[in-house]
Amino acid sequence: MKKVTIAIGTWFLGILLLMGLFLSIWIVLPAPIFSLLPLSVGAPEISPGLIIFNVSIPISYWVILRIGDYYQPRLLFVSLCLSGLATILSAAPLIQFSSAQQQAQRSIVASLGQDYLNDLPPSLTDKMRSQPLIISDIWGGISSPKVRVDRDILFANPDGVPLTLNIYRPAQVGNYPAIVSIYGGAWQRGNPDSDDTFNRYIAAQGYVVWAISYRHAPTYHFPIQIEDVRQALTYIQHAADTETNLDRVAMIGRSAGAQLAMLAAYQDPPFPIRALVNYYGPVNLTAGYEDVPTPDPIESRATLRAFLGGTPQTVPKLYRQASPINAVKSALPASLLIYGGKDHIIESKYGSYLAQQLRSAGNQAVFIEIPWADHAFDAVFSGISNQLALYYTERFLAWALVK
């Protein structure tokens, strides 16, 4: 009976060991297909937990074998080897974290200046994250105070399609800088609730957040989406009693939403936009079609055809118009560009090139690459990638809108 119990325990630990190794592999391996993308996105974000999990398995093996007086050197050796490999893989983001954070710091200081945070009010700086990474927040979550939220506000109804927005405001009535937030989703899915956690968090710091919607592909092709975004901006411009300071407005977008945010901010918006935050947004759609990443988990060419209604050969003008790189000129809003180094949907090289072009035109641009992060890394809000991104995003926004 004792040996049976030990055998069951070792088999169970073996399953856990293989599970830990399987999850850890996705920290370094990009997803080959869309259904595996959650693993590739999520595994790096919970890597500190995976380290603990992977280390605990051989220890548990040793304890069980010791208690049962059932010494199996081969079994223990195999568990040590496999757990060691899994631990090395799961430690990769933490090993790289310090270097990535230092590079991010150099980038923001080079663009905004060493004293970019000077003169910010303590009421704001006290709410910011104290460190780029707080390990306990990975499990405990990132908290934010209560905010006021008004949902499903109709701002337009083109072709009978209701376009709505959410407004997130601090708990106290006042007059606040504003952030216009545009969700991603390959231009085909999403709604103003998509980035609810971030919108609540940043509103609690003293901003009015406008989370807007737009009509989706493939039913509607570009430029319908950017027209809807501009319609939302016009609505915001004329909306009354929203506590919004229109002289201090930034735009933020993720993936497809970042592409729309860049076009809206860079191409004569209805009121001045002070800053742009781009999380892993498409920059050059023609190049994205012709130079498909390998692997290609979302079938990039099919996604672009659904958005633009054709290929770069059949609708070249639309590809040029939809590419933010072609909107670069002087006197643009300051831009924060954050990309994942493991991203095989929108590769980080495009963000780097955009930053170079913006600087060459005399604009302020901060480029941050998170080496281990995949596309949509911030979906795990308390993960290590989003903690780093959030640390610099909140500081960039405070510099642009409050200082």
Image: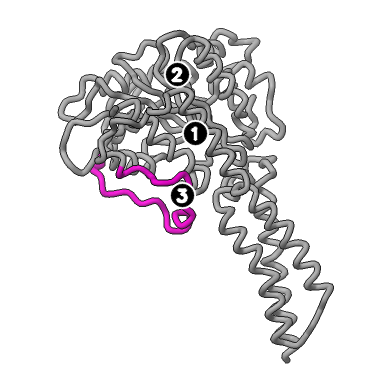
Q: Quadrant of the C terminus?
A: top left
Q: How many marks?
A: 3
- Report the residue at 38% width, 28% height from top: 115
- Report the residue at 47% width, 21% height from top: 365
Mark 1 and mark 3 residues within 8 Å of each other at the beta carbon: no
**Residue 196: x and y, percent?**
37, 42
**Residue 372: x and y, percent?**
61, 41
Of 304 and 127, nearer the camera is: 127
**Image-quadrant location for residue 37:** top right
Looking at this view, name the residue that lies furthest to the right: 74
Of 63 and 9, nearer the camera is: 63
**Image-quadrant location for residue 15:** bottom right
Helix, strand, or loop for circle 1? helix
Residue 164 visible in this rendered orientation of the protein:
no
**Residue 401 belongs to the span the image colors magenta:** no
Question: Relative to residue 395, is residue 15 depicted above or below?
Answer: below
Question: Relative to residue 326, is residue 86 depicted above or below?
Answer: below
- Read off the residue under disc 1: 105
Give the number of the mark in front: 1 or 3.
1
- Report the residue at 49% width, 31% height from top: 279
Dot 2 crowding, Cα within 10 Å, few <14, some 14–19, many 20+: many
Q: Which residues are magenta?
A: 126-150
Give the number of the mark in front: 2 or 3.
2
Of 71 and 243, nearer the camera is: 71
Dominant secondary structure of the magenta stretch?
loop
Residue type at mark 3: give it.
Ser
Question: Marks 1 and 3, Cα distance to the nearest angstrom?
Answer: 20 Å
- Read off the residue under disc 3: 382
The disc placed on residue 194 is none
Looking at this view, name the residue that lies furthest to the front: 114
- Read off the residue under disc 2: 364
